[in-house]
């Protein structure tokens, strides 16, 4: 099981949280709490540095200025991309912008690589276990498989 699987695993547990068996409910609650700690860490990793936000705003401004315009003076988009009028001038402006934000872009690239690595790492949570007798009644095989990591 990988860290990137934790969102789905949490959703699988939540489906059964109201089960009346206190042993199962307690284990489910404890596991959700453990998962939430890792998910909070993942969510905090997603924060975008201010330098990248500024870069994106300036990049968008260049794209809008350099795009061909329609009859109303609005930028023309083709397949969700700006139809750029002066390609060489545009590329130079973007290159200059990338140079201006070189350090921020490198930090963002490193940040993304670190995040991908973390998400692809094996999950290190030691999940609370329950016995088969404590499982909710009438569970399907698919439902049992979705929480099999919790079963002794």
Image (spheres, rainbow, N blue to C red):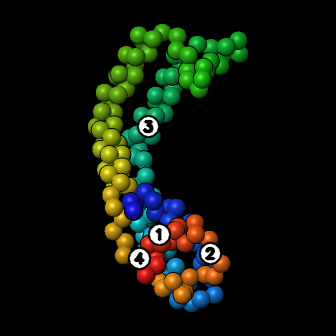
Name the side, left or right, on which 71 lies relative to 106: right
Rendered view: 145 above or below 93: below
Rendered view: 135 above or below 96: below
108 or 147: nearer the viewer = 147
Label located before the other in sequence (3 or 4): 3
Q: Residue at x 50, y 61 (%)?
A: 7
Label located before the other in sequence (4 or 1): 1
Marks 4 and 1 sit apart, C-alpha to C-alpha, by: 12 Å
Task: Say which mark, if any, is on residue 139.
Answer: 2
Q: Secondary structure at mark 2?
A: loop
Label located before the other in sequence (1 or 2): 1
- Write down the residue under mark 1: 36
Which label sits in the foreground, 4 or 1? Answer: 4
- Write down the residue under mark 4: 127
Q: Residue at x 67, y 13 (%)?
A: 70
Q: Mark 4 Cα within 10 Å, few/some/many (few <14, many 20+)?
A: some
Marks 2 and 4 sit apart, C-alpha to C-alpha, by: 20 Å
- Write down the residue under mark 3: 54
Q: Residue at x 35, y 42 (%)?
A: 108
| Picture coordinates of residue 71, whole percent (x, y) | 70, 12
Q: Quadrant of the C terminus?
A: bottom left
Marks 3 and 4 sit apart, C-alpha to C-alpha, by: 42 Å
Q: Quadrant of the N terminus?
A: bottom left
| Picture coordinates of residue 2, whole percent (x, y) | 39, 60
């Amino acid at each position: 099981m990988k860290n990137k699987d934790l969102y789905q695993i949490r959703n699988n547990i939540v489906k059964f949280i109201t089960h009346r068996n206190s042993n199962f409910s307690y284990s489910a609650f404890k596991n959700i709490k453990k998962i939430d700690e890792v998910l909070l860490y993942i969510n905090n990793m997603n924060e975008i540095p201010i330098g990248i936000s500024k870069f994106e705003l300036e990049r968008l401004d260049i794209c809008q200025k350099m795009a061909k315009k329609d009859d109303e003076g609005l930028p023309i988009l083709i397949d969700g991309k700006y139809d750029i009028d002066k390609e060489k001038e545009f590329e130079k402006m973007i290159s200059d912008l990338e140079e201006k934000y070189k350090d921020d872009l490198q930090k963002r690239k490193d940040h993304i690589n670190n995040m991908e690595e973390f998400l692809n790492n094996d999950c290190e949570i030691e999940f609370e276990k329950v016995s088969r007798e404590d499982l909710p009644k009438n569970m399907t095989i698919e439902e049992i498989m979705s929480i099999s990591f919790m079963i002794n």
